[in-house]
Image (cartoon, rainbow, N blue to C red):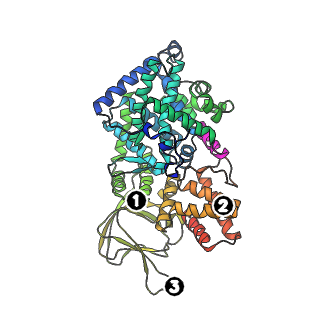
């Protein structure tokens, strides 16, 4: 039973639990945390030391526990907002990065001290991904907080992990409600909700019984409000994409992984038919390429290697700018998208961005109206503010549009559109700027990152003083009033691409069920163009759609 019909609480824990079942996430002393994680990890491993696992896994019995942990990941694919976020940000949640990152975070929660540099590095990357995805936001204490509307979805990730491992323990002879089962259940709730707290969850179920009530209420919510066929297709695509990796990590074949480690409801949702044999072939290729070392030493080594990318001069400068950006705009999210791209890319080729110092005299322009930009700039520092001005035929002098302070990003929309800049960026006083420069070739790679697309779209809306929520409202209201199928499709696509993961995508037309995020962008561009060309629209709606065209380039 849901506990709140107040729209202010929609999507929060209050929707699913009574107030006295919810507590603020407690802060565990480091010594207590480290003792608990070691004791619980050893306890879980011991219970999975069964004859079956000794035979199947040739002594490495803990692999079965990891398989059930992956079963928790698959369970979260029943949650529409999680699927929409992962799919929309596929540039940042590639199968390899998604699974290796999840694996390192999960294992790190049990294997690494919370205060270690390696665990902090893992958490930093997870938080950056979630911020770019639009489900968490930085806060003044230096951490992150999940956005209210995603709180319950976020908490359910920890819930799904706990429940999948408890199901595995049941299969190994430890019933969930037995004395030992409850003891391990309480410990896992503490560890996994604490782990979620490192990445933005600030409230949790009070205890194991409250956890059970939240699980039951949320599971019933999933059954009462199933996702649209399009979102289910997205979930199935993600499942197919990550299955070779999770089976390789779990050291079992695809058929066994699906049959043993996924619960019946999840298995029917994601794999209503037997998995494609091609997935098993991919798994075997991954195994032949070499198993990813899951030891604590390898975990530390990967974190240390990734930390070296963060220490690279251009990445470190961008990271400093990201942390210095104000968090009441989307500028920090756009900076974060570029930063995440550099960190992911840096592990492959490590080519740094050019750093440039520019000296401007009073009245000099960094970007000139009417000129097609060939570079995008991340302004790391500026001694004086910059001014955005625009000249029109209707006025004698240029009109001031905005004043910008570092850190900020300039030129991304001009690069996206490949057309002359519609305004100039000048300095009214002598000025010295420190920039990171993204040339056309690098931008062409960056623009394929759908997290960057969503952040850029949201930033354009902010600069036009029409944020994504307002545009979405105008579109949704007009689509509802007119019952126009194409406007309804545009409305859902726009909200999806600019960060609303609660959209069902059940009104989208002229788009294949297995369309990629980039194809969603192309569909939106085409549909907006068709509506503008063929409909008599109210002036404010026409202006809104024109702004979407500018956003998409």
Describe the element under mark 3 as helix, strand or loop: loop
Question: Relative to 182, is 51 above or below?
Answer: above
Q: Which residue is mark 3?
A: 393
Q: Disc 2 marks which residue?
A: 480
Which is nearer the N-term, disc 3 or disc 1? Answer: 1
User: Looking at this view, is 383 or 530 the one in front?
Assistant: 530
**Which of the two marks, 3 or 1, is nearer to us in this view?**
1
Near mark 1 (Cα within 10 A), the count class, few <14, some 14-19 or many ≥20, is: few
Q: How far, Cα to Cα, is label 2 from label 3?
A: 39 Å
Q: Please, what secondary structure does the residue beneath circle 2 have?
A: helix
Q: Is residue 349 visible?
A: no
Quarter of the figure that contains the N terminus: top right
Comparing 427 with 444, the one in front is 427
Q: Earlier in the sequence, mark 2 or mark 3?
A: 3
Q: Earlier in the sequence, mark 2 or mark 1?
A: 1
Give the CA distance from mark 3 to mark 1: 34 Å
User: Is disc 3 surrounded by few (<14), some (14 to 19) or many (20+) residues within 10 Å?
Assistant: few
Labels 2, 3: front one: 2
Residue range corresponding to the magenta coloring: 227-239
Residue under label 1, please give it: 328
Looking at the image, can residue 341 be seen? yes
The reply, left or right, for residue 241 in relation to residue 371 is right
Residue 53, position as x, y percentages in the image = 51, 16
């Amino acid at each position: 039973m849901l506990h709140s019909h107040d729209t202010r609480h929609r999507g929060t824990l209050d929707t699913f639990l009574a107030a006295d079942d919810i507590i603020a996430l407690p802060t565990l002393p480091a010594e207590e945390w480290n003792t608990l994680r070691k004791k619980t990890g050893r306890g879980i491993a011991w219970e999975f030391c069964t004859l079956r696992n000794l035979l199947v896994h040739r002594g490495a019995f803990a692999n079965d526990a990891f398989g059930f942990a992956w079963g928790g990941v698959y369970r979260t694919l029943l949650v529409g907002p999680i699927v929409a976020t992962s799919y929309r940000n596929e540039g940042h949640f590639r199968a390899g990065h998604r699974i290796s990152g999840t694996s390192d975070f999960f294992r790190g929660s049990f294997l690494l001290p919370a205060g270690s540099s390696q665990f902090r590095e893992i958490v930093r990357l997870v938080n950056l991904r979630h911020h770019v995805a639009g489900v968490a936001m930085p806060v003044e204490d230096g951490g992150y907080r999940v956005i209210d509307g995603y709180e319950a979805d976020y908490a359910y990730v920890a819930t799904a992990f706990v429940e999948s491992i408890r199901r595995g323990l049941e299969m190994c002879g430890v019933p969930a409600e037995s004395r030992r089962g409850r003891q391990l259940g309480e410990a896992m709730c503490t560890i996994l909700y604490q782990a979620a707290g490192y990445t933005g969850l600030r409230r949790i179920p009070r205890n194991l019984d409250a956890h059970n009530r939240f699980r039951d209420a949320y599971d019933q919510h999933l059954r009462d409000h199933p996702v649209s066929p399009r979102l289910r297709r997205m979930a199935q695509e993600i499942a197919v994409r990550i299955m070779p990796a999770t089976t390789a990590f779990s050291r079992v074949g695809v058929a066994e992984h699906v049959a043993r480690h996924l619960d019946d409801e999840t298995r029917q949702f994601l794999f209503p038919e037997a998995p494609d044999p091609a997935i098993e072939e991919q798994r075997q290729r991954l195994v032949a390429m070499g198993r990813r070392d899951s030891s604590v030493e390898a975990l530390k080594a990967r974190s240390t290697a990734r930390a070296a990318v963060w220490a690279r001069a251009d990445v470190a400068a961008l990271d400093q700018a990201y942390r210095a950006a104000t968090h009441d705009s989307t500028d920090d999210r756009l900076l974060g998208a570029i930063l995440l791209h550099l960190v992911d890319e840096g592990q492959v080729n490590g080519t740094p961005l050019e750093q440039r110092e520019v000296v401007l005299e009073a009245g000099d322009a960094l970007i000139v109206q009417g000129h097609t930009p060939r570079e995008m700039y991340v302004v790391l520092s500026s001694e004086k503010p910059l001014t955005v001005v625009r000249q029109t035929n209707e006025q004698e002098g240029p009109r001031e549009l905005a004043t910008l302070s570092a850190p900020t990003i300039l030129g991304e929309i001009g690069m996206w559109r490949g057309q002359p800049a519609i305004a100039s960026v000048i300095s009214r006083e002598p000025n010295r700027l420190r920039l990171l420069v993204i040339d056309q070739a690098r931008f062409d790679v960056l623009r394929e990152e759908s997290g960057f697309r969503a952040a850029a779209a949201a930033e354009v809306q902010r600069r036009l003083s029409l944020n994504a929520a307002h545009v979405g409202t105008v579109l949704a209201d007009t689509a509802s009033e007119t019952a126009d199928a194409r406007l309804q499709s545009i409305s859902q696509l726009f909200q999806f691409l600019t960060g609303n993961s609660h959209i069902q995508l059940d009104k989208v037309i002229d788009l294949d069920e297995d369309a990629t995020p980039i194809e969603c962008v192309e569909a939106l561009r085409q549909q907006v163009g068709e509506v503008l060309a063929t409909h008599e629209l109210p002036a404010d709606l026409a202006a809104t759609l024109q702004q979407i065209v500018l956003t998409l380039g």
